[in-house]
């Protein structure tokens, strides 16, 4: 057993349930500043229980490259202990017979009592737990640089009209109003946020979860495309291919005033030592106050054969939902705990606001799954929508009416 390095590590080592050291290899795409801090915290916790961490990080926000690598490894009979898999992808891997049953650990830790149904249900395949949730990210956030807003003399916008009015002034003052990276999943992040503002939570649900053709090709959807395209005027020409965390840096460096991005962006600000309310602001994305687009990170557990590695894997499942771990991990990641029995005092104001809105949205209908993060639909539907959205956003002569028609057709053929 390796020697624990911190007091936390010492405590964890003493309370360990494992007697045999095993290998823990987790495929993930957490490589930016805040993400890497969170992943290192996980590594430290695993090592403190005496296991060996084998690094398996594949860069690329949204996880596209990671998924390609995972398929190769799994098909060649050498899967990792766990992989960052989300939403309906978990079902797909379950159907293929790759995932192992964690029900013993889930029962022992009373998951049904502490994890909200919306997160818990995603982890089940054939009524067995095959994955563990680790956090809840809110996607519909607007991050803003308060110094730029003050210099320009605008308030942080709450509605779409306020956003465009502020963006005009920011642009006139010589700043980039909106930091953005033109990768497909980031384009869809903007699109789904505008869709939530224009359609409301119910319309969003009907469009992207129920795949209701009458909403997908409706005049309201045309309006979504119209407003979405307007954003392009406030983004700098170098946006294509830019990583999301480089866009976040544009806000922290004072080059751009705002970014619409999930709260993994807060992990970046935190990694730079910046403080919310002082160095940056967090508010609901324009037009989505009180609503919550969720992205739940989870690890699916693969079937293994080595006894020690199976034990290590079960320890990993225990660690992920441990209360102390949930605090340290989510503070670094920018997300909120996925356990509903947590004291939020150690968290910053953005996280506390997030938890409040999440809890309220569980009962008031404001909770929607993120399309860009694979929470709303199958990967086929998601890919079809992403193509339409990105082609439209990048087109020289983009036509919102045609885009809505194309969207409906693309979804139909991917269903
Ligand atoms: C998401 C993931 C988040 C975040 C983001 C950017 O897919 O769920 O945890 O890190 O990618 O890499």
Image (cartoon, grey):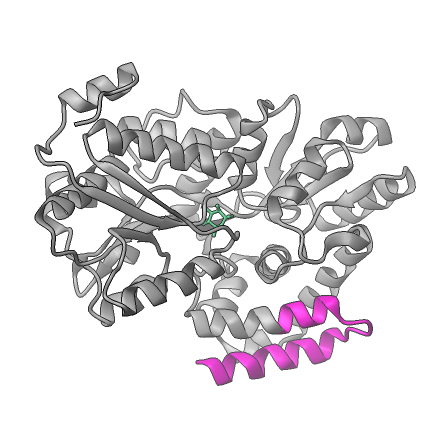
Instruction: Identify which residue is drawn at 52% across, 57% down.
Output: 201
Q: Is residue 407 visible?
A: yes
Instruction: Identify which residue is drawn at 51% across, 71% down.
Output: 383
Relative side of 70 to 218, left or right:
left
Expressed as whole percent of the image width and height from the top left, the position of residue 44 reads 31, 29
Relative side of 315 to 153, left or right:
left
Expressed as whole percent of the image width and height from the top left, the position of residue 333 reads 45, 36
Q: Is residue 296 located in the magenta-colored stretch of the structure?
A: no
Q: Residue furthest top?
A: 7
Q: Quadrant of residue 147?
A: top right
Q: Is residue 356 visible?
A: no
Relative side of 230 to 107, left or right:
right
Q: Is residue 402 located in the magenta-colored stretch of the structure?
A: yes
For this rendering, which residue is in front, 61 or 386? 61
Q: Quadrant of residue 268?
A: top right
The range drawn in magenta is 388-415
């Amino acid at each position: 057993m390796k020697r624990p390095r911190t007091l936390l590590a010492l405590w964890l080592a003493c309370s360990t349930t494992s007697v045999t050291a095993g290998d823990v290899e987790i495929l993930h795409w957490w490589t930016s500043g805040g993400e890497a801090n969170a992943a290192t915290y996980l590594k430290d916790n695993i090592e403190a229980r005496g296991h060996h961490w084998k690094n398996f990080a594949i860069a690329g926000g949204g996880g596209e490259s990671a998924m390609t690598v995972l398929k190769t490894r799994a098909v060649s009979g050498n899967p990792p202990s766990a992989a960052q898999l989300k939403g309906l992808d978990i079902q797909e891997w379950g159907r293929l017979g790759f995932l192992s049953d964690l029900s013993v650990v889930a029962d022992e830790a009373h998951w049904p009592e502490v994890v909200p149904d919306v997160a818990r249900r995603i982890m089940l395949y054939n009524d067995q737990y095959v994955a563990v949730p680790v956090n809840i990210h809110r996607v519909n956030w607007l991050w803003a640089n308060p110094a730029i807003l003050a210099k320009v003399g605008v308030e942080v916008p709450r509605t779409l009209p306020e956003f465009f009015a502020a963006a005009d002034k920011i642009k006139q003052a010589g700043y980039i109003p909106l930091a953005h990276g033109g990768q497909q999943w980031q384009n869809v992040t903007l699109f789904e946020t505008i869709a939530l503002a224009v359609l409301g939570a119910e319309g969003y649900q009907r469009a992207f979860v129920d795949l209701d053709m009458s909403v997908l090709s409706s005049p309201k959807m045309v309006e979504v495309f119209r407003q979405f395209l307007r954003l392009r005027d406030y983004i700098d020409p170098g946006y294509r291919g830019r990583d999301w965390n480089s866009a976040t840096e544009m806000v922290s460096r004072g080059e751009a005033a705002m970014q619409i991005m999930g709260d993994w962006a807060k992990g970046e600000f935190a990694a730079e030592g910046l403080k919310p309310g002082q160095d940056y602001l967090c508010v609901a994305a324009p037009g989505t106050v009180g609503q919550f687009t969720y992205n739940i990170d989870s690890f699916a557990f693969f079937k293994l054969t080595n006894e020690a590695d199976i034990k290590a894997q079960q320890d990993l499942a225990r660690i992920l939902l441990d209360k102390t771990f949930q605090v340290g991990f989510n503070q670094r990641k920018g997300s909120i705990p996925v356990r509903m029995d947590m004291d939020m005092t150690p968290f910053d104001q953005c996280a506390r606001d997030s938890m409040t809105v999440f809890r309220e949205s569980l009962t008031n209908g404001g909770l929607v799954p993120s399309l860009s993060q694979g929470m709303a639909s199958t990967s086929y539907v998601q890919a079809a929508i992403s193509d339409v959205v990105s082609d439209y956003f990048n087109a020289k002569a983009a036509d919102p009416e045609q885009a809505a028609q194309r969207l409906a057709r693309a979804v139909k053929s991917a269903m």
